[in-house]
Image: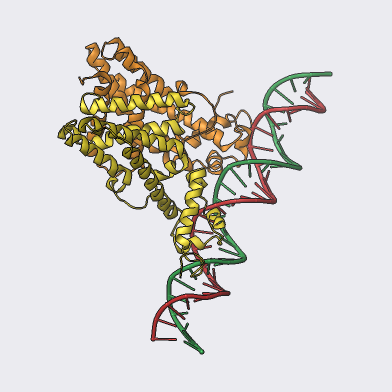
Chain colours: A yellow, B orange, C red, D green
Amino acid sequence: MPPSSKPYHHGNLRAALVEAGAELARSSGPDGVVLREVARRTGVSHNAAYRHFADRDELLSEIATVAADQLEQAMQRRLDEVTESDPARRARARLRATGRAYVEFALAEPGLFTVAFCPTDVEAAGPDEAAPYVLLGQVLDELVSAGALSPEGRMGADVVCWSAVHGLSVLLLDGPLRGLTAEERGGVVEKLLATIERGLTGAVG
Amino acid sequence: MPPSSKPYHHGNLRAALVEAGAELARSSGPDGVVLREVARRTGVSHNAAYRHFADRDELLSEIATVAADQLEQAMQRRLDEVTESDPARRARARLRATGRAYVEFALAEPGLFTVAFCPTDVEAAGPDEAAPYVLLGQVLDELVSAGALSPEGRMGADVVCWSAVHGLSVLLLDGPLRGLTAEERGGVVEKLLATIERGLTGAVG
DNA sequence: GAGCGCATGTGGACAGTGTCCACATGAATG
DNA sequence: CATTCATGTGGACACTGTCCACATGCGCTC
């Protein structure tokens, strides 16, 4: 039986709900993910979701995973665009690309970005599980391999980088920094990336 | 007529509502600020608030101002504790104290901190109005006066510092970094502050 | 000092939400 | 073919923000 049509009562309701919810999240953020509206869009009665999710929160946290994956993919795309060949310069460029992509995604997909980080209480998993975090860790490891970052400097560098770009994203999104022009935003992002890079490696290349 | 008792229908209902709302915000964050509960706690009927606020959002944004003021006061207190006398070292210490106080407040008062930065749509005011932002700007100016930060480096430094501590606060609060022990948190905060300081000034004192 | 107006507070209503319940349906199993 | 159990339905409840018509009484005007 092809996964299209309706092999069972509805077929893959769970996936359909997550998809509809993600669409809602994209356009309206966490508060836009209304259980009854998700059901409506999936062409199913309210309550149907309760056979697949204990809670609205459980659906939200599933959507959050989807959003985090999209963020990671966006970062990966930007990473792949780096063409620099000198190892140290390459690692530095890839670090900057990571940060740039992060803020870029937040501004391009504010709803998804917000959902990706909305407190969910579910999954007591540490930061190691978050896909974007893993990616950042790899890039920092490259920096160490290239000799641009000392092993001592590597410790906790993840959190420093992440905090900086995440904070900037939030402040630009709905914090006091919204309203900046695209040009101003660009300058601020570069300044932040340069500062972090210099702070971690002691120089900027 | 003393502002106690009830000089008019209720007296200063507006202020009472804001206070009750702030209490709710402190214990339960933005979603905890429920119009009807605020009214209940103030001993007034629901709807009464509508004579003083157009909207729940308008009340929330008033509470946000209160929360921002408390944040600023907490930062100011920590600033005043710096005793270093050498100008450059003093300015650096004060910058670190500012950042430390910011994260400290976020962790100590998560509800108020979140409310202080929840998107309110009201007041299109730029970042210049936010009290904590002004404080940070002053400290950075001290750094320039003390010769520890170049005027070019000063440009945009506000945003860099703010982004870093804000991002860290958010990630520690309900992001993937919650669950860190107090000790781990302390280490991360210091690492972040040192990195920013080195990135801005080129050295760490 | 009497009377009135308008800001202030009240009670009721409505739509919308998340969640619980009892019930319906039908695919898979014996 | 009958039964079972996961899956989906419809109705209900408590709760929310917001709008409405109405009540109340302070402060102004005559």
Q: Is residue A137 visible?
A: yes
Q: Is residue B105 visible?
A: no
| Rendered residue at 36%/16% (across/down) | B138
> Residue B26 at x, y = what percent?
42, 37
- Quadrant location, the C terminus of chain B: top left
Residue A144: which quarter of the image? top left
The mark total stands at: 0
> Residue A125 at x, y = what percent?
30, 50
Query: Which one is nearer the viewer's eye here, D11 or A73?
Result: A73
Residue B172: which quarter of the image? top left
Q: Is residue A88 above or below residue A41?
A: above
As drawn, is A124 to the left or to the right of A150? right
> Residue A150 at x, y = what percent?
16, 32
Query: Which one is nearer the viewer's eye here, A87 or A199?
Result: A87
Query: Which one is nearer the viewer's eye here, A25 or B188?
Result: A25
Q: Is residue B199 above or below residue B54?
A: above
As drawn, is A43 to the left or to the right of A160? right
> Residue B35 at x, y = what percent?
55, 41
Query: Which one is nearer the viewer's eye here, A176 or A43?
Result: A43
As drawn, is A74 to the left or to the right of B89? right
| Rendered residue at 25%/38% (across/down) | A139
| Rendered residue at 30%/10% (across/down) | B145
Residue B92: which quarter of the image? top left
